[in-house]
Image (cartoon, helix red, strand yellow):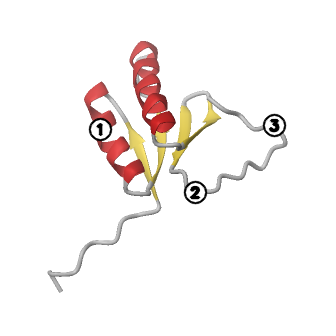
Amino acid sequence: RQDQPVPRPDTMVYYLSSLSECATVIRDIIAGTSALVNFDDTDDRLSQRILDTLAGAAFALNAKVRKITDNTYLIAPENVKVNMSRHVERRY
């Protein structure tokens, strides 16, 4: 059926290559979708600018930012519980 909305995923994985792509991630966070952001193929300076933008948005939205690896971050909406398997919780 074409009139039914497409269900949104609980988590989206992003490989960002520009600052303007942050808007899509922020819209997903507002809609209740978690974002896993990977910077493996992104310049370090741009990665930091993107991360700063997303962290500011996360703060404004009461979302959580967790560092998963050196180049991967999880941004979860306020209503999503994030459990880390290690005893040390890595925050941005």
Few, some or many residues within 10 Å of mark 3 (<14, 14–19, 20+): few
- Give the residue furthest to the top: 45
Q: Residue at x 15, y 81 (%)?
A: 3
Q: Residue at x 29, y 38 (%)?
A: 23
Between disc 2 and disc 3, the foreground one is 2
The kind of secondary structure element at disc 2 is loop
Question: On the image, which quarter does residue 73 sit in?
Answer: top right
In the picture of the structure, the residue carrying the numbered disc 2 is 80
Earlier along the polypeptide chain: callout 1 or callout 3?
1
Q: Are the two marked residues, 2 and 1, in contact with CB atoms closer than 8 angstroms?
A: no
Earlier along the polypeptide chain: callout 2 or callout 1?
1
Q: Identify whether 26 is placed above or below 3.
A: above
- Give the residue furthest to the bottom: 1
> Residue 10: x, y in percent?
47, 62
In the picture of the structure, the residue carrying the numbered disc 3 is 88
The kind of secondary structure element at disc 3 is loop
Few, some or many residues within 10 Å of mark 1 (<14, 14–19, 20+): few
Q: Is residue 18 visible?
A: no
Q: Residue at x 39, y 38 (%)?
A: 15
The kind of secondary structure element at disc 1 is helix
Q: Is residue 88 visible?
A: yes
User: What amino acid type is highlighted by mark number 2?
Assistant: Val
Left or right: where 67 falls relative to 10: right
Earlier along the polypeptide chain: callout 2 or callout 3?
2
User: What amino acid type is highlighted by mark number 1?
Assistant: Ala
Q: Please name whichever residue, 67 or 76, is drawn nearer the observer in this view of the structure.
A: 76
Q: Please name whichever residue, 58 or 20, is drawn nearer the observer in this view of the structure.
A: 58
In the picture of the structure, the residue carrying the numbered disc 1 is 23
User: What amino acid type is highlighted by mark number 3?
Assistant: Val
